[in-house]
Amino acid sequence: MSEDCIFCKIICGAIPSKKIYEDDEVIALNDINPSASVHFLIVPKLHIASLASCKTQHQALLGHMLLLAPKLAKEHGLAGFKTLINTGAAGGQEVFHIHIHVLGGGEKSPKA
Ligand code: 5GP
Ligand code: ZN
């Protein structure tokens, strides 16, 4: 838990949100500013700043997050989808709590 982190606040319930998925390790929620008809984020409950901060100990968690993408995409009716992990400010990352973007169903803007 990082006190300044918006995703940590969402995970602990300090900021209300409509989660589309939750288990012991992760949540998924619709992006507040979607770039496609379907655009959700897969976010670990553990605060890890970015992919560049991940260590070997996070390998299983990263695999779990990645395998959720096709499962949740299918549940949202997507025949195909894009995944995106922005890493570092120079990589376009705005929220420094690692997350996977899942986008599909037609782009709304060229962001991803
Ligand atoms: P990044 O640029 O860090 O990869 O992506 C951060 C994403 O988080 C952005 O697409 C942004 O729209 C989304 N986001 C930022 N704040 C919130 C929030 O409070 N709730 C939700 N659901 N998404 C957020
Ligand atoms: Zn966090």
Image (cartoon, helix red, strand yellow):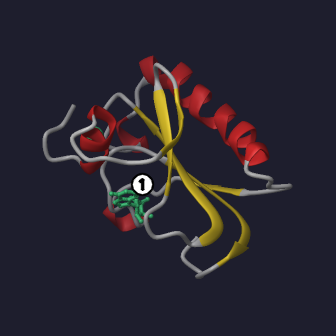
Q: Quadrant of residue 87?
A: bottom left
Q: Which residue is found at the position 25% from the left and 47% from the top?
A: 15
Relative to 104, is 43 on the left or the right?
left
Residue nearest the viewer, comparing 18 with 23? 18
Relative to 99, is 84 on the left or the right?
right
Relative to 89, is 51 on the left or the right?
right
Q: Quadrant of ligand 2?
A: top left
Q: Which residue is found at the position 57% from the left and 33% from the top?
A: 65
Q: Residues within 10 Å of mark 1 (few under 14, many from 20)?
A: many
- Is residue 109 shown above or below 97? below
Residue nearest the viewer, comparing 11 with 47? 11
Residue furthest to the right in view is: 79
Q: Which residue is found at the position 46% from the left and 57% from the top?
A: 86
Q: Amino acid at mark 1?
A: Thr
Residue furthest to the left in view is: 3
Q: Quadrant of residue 67?
A: top right
Residue 1 image point, x, y percent: 22, 31
> Residue tagged by mark 1?
87
Q: Which residue is found at the position 80% from the left and 53% from the top?
A: 77
Relative to 9, is 75 on the left or the right?
right
How many numbered circles are shown?
Answer: 1
Residue 62 image point, x, y percent: 54, 30
- Secondary structure under the numbered disc 1 in the rendered image: loop
